[in-house]
Amino acid sequence: RKEVEQDPGPFNVPEGATVAFNCTYSNSASQSFFWYRQDCRKEPKLLMSVYSSGNEDGRFTAQLNRASQYISLLIRDSKLSDSATYLCAVNLNTGGFKTIFGAGTRLFVKA
Amino acid sequence: NAGVTQTPKFQVLKTGQSMTLQCAQDMNHNSMYWYRQDPGMGLRLIYYSASEGTTDKGEVPNGYNVSRLNKREFSLRLESAAPSQTSVYFCASNDVGARKSYGYTFGSGTRLTVV
């Protein structure tokens, strides 16, 4: 089993839709969780950090479920500009230096 | 505010050639990292430097060496390039607290092709 797993998608949604991605992790000792956005041929950019149960930033909400070992990202009112690959990342905090990334979920938002 | 600067952006090497990828950050972060990204594999950690003067192996260190030149700079060297090292390389930096790790700031990447 991979340490961090994501559904690769693609998710194809119309503008204005709500879409959710899940990311599962295998190490129950993980402490810090992140969602990054990566545009085609660009570097990943930090979207949200999650340290407790969840985090919200505008149209984006991240939720952490420690019991089931997954984090989710919810995007409300999708925009064309939300089209990208979304990477989940998990850090053990033991020394804090090894962040494991999922392979990413591709999202296409269409007019 | 430049953030993390990587050079070069593109490089083509012949098998057996060597090269050094340069990375510098201006955010006063203690920790720096080198990742490679391959299709379907996600980002994999090559080496990291927790602080100035220290370096450690990540998940895929074979064929690479690193140098933490100072707090700002962290270079990655390929001594004898192989086609399996064709990839996109990202440098990143962050701060790590006592109880949590902060998100990374990535450089814009180096697209390396080994023929």
Image: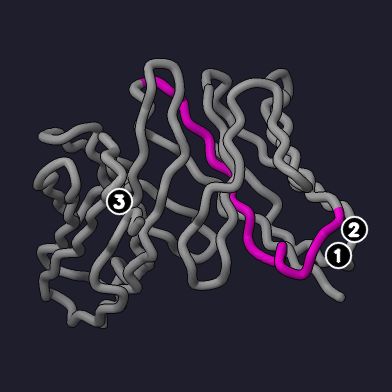
Whole-number angstrom distance, CA of label 3 to CA of label 1:
34 Å
Label 2 is found on which chain of the structure? A
In the picture shown, does residue B13 fall above or below B81?
below
Nearest the viewer among A109 and A8 is A109
Where is residue B57? Give x, y as percent: 24, 39
Where is residue A87? Give x, y as percent: 59, 50
Q: Which residue is mark 3?
A: B34
User: Count of labels shown?
Assistant: 3
Magenta residues, start to end: A77-94
Q: Secondary structure at mark 2?
A: loop
Q: Which residue is mark 1?
A: A13
Say which amino acid is labelled 3.
Answer: Trp
Q: Secondary structure at mark 3?
A: strand
Say which amino acid is labelled 1.
Answer: Val
Q: Secondary structure at mark 1?
A: strand
Q: Is residue A1 visible?
A: no
